[in-house]
Amino acid sequence: MIRTPEALLQALGLPEQLLPAARQGHQLFPVRVTQAFLNRIRPGDLNDPLLRQVLPLTNETEPSPPGFCKDPLAEEHAIASPGLLHKYTSRVLTVSTSACAIHCRYCFRRHFPYAEQRQSQDDFAQKLDYIRQNPAVNEVILSGGDPLMLPDAQLRRQMEALATLPQIRTVRIHTRLPVVLPERITDALLDALECFPRQRVLVIHCNHPQELDADVVKALARLRPLTTLLNQTVLLRGVNDTAETLIQLSQTLFECDVLPYYLHQMDPVEATHHFAIADARAVEIHRELTRSLPGYLVPRLVREEAGAPSKTLLISS
Ligand code: SF4
């Protein structure tokens, strides 16, 4: 695990001139990169699409343009119970942990007040009570941070507890770990997931085909018999903002039985504006995907908007 900008630059043979800016970004949101992800970055290439997701750049410390803020999705207003967000009628999202194996510079929760939510992180019972009192809720999303950072025993307890609620038809897990830490997909983890006996959906987060190496393919193959596999991608300038890259991503995901689900316009989070893409360009890229891929491999181009009853489609077909 790389935990400092110095170690990241050294491991990849990148010039020391990058260090002052990287240190500044590190103060805002610490550098964290798994060895598995590091192995897929081309040494010495500052334009590597994986490197750009994890290396703090000067731009992070620049004042953000209008519209960028710490909580653009107003998630603090959606906190229904400690560690539980209720944005959409039928789904609740549990902030299971603040931990992630990798720190993505564009992260929409980089400013989330995890410390305030920590008080009852272990008190899953309180979340279950809230769900019971809201019978319209039929799906629980485990998010974070990354929920697969939880110890197996804790994850197992949560899945067992959710299984006791007949109203819950689906448990969905949003995780980047099969991609950035494929060795996390162990027998014990698979056993824990099976403790919820109804519909299981696992939404991975992969932005570029270079993230999908042989170890990730193996990890996904182990998950496939247990769960529906979907992917969400964030559209990021300098990382994946070409149709060619996203076409290759969809095709490679499909070879792993993962369906492309969402292509997100990035949330306007403070210190991330250098990744933003204009809507017109996003739509142009998406039109090219639609022309080149079968419909089932075209992710929906969406934006999340504070207070909206669902994600907003930027293009309807
Ligand atoms: S894995 Fe997800 S939650 Fe964690 S830093 Fe990356 S984008 Fe944020």
Image (cartoon, grey):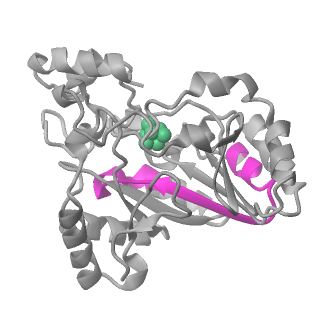
Q: Position of residue 295 (x, y in %)?
A: 39, 84
Pick whichever, 124 or 37, lies toward us. 124
* As drawn, 106 above or below 93: above
**Residue 123 left/right relative to 52:** right
The reply to whether residue 144 is visible in this rendering is: no
Q: Locate the C terminus by quadrant.
A: bottom left
**Residue 204 left/right relative to 200:** left
Q: Position of residue 80 (x, y in %)?
A: 70, 42
Q: Locate the N terminus by quadrant.
A: top left
Q: Which residue does the image show at 75% across and 27% down from the upper left?
A: 120
The stretch of residues the image draws in magenta is 188-216
Q: Which residue does the image show at 60% across and 21% down from the upper left?
A: 115
Picture quarter containing residue 227?
A: bottom right
**Residue 62 left/right relative to 250:** left
Q: Which residue does the image show at 45% across and 37% down from the upper left?
A: 71
Picture quarter containing residue 8?
A: top left
Q: Position of residue 126 (x, y in %)?
A: 83, 37
* As drawn, 216 above or below 312: above
Pick whichever, 40 or 102, lies toward us. 102
The reply to whether residue 233 is visible in this rendering is: yes
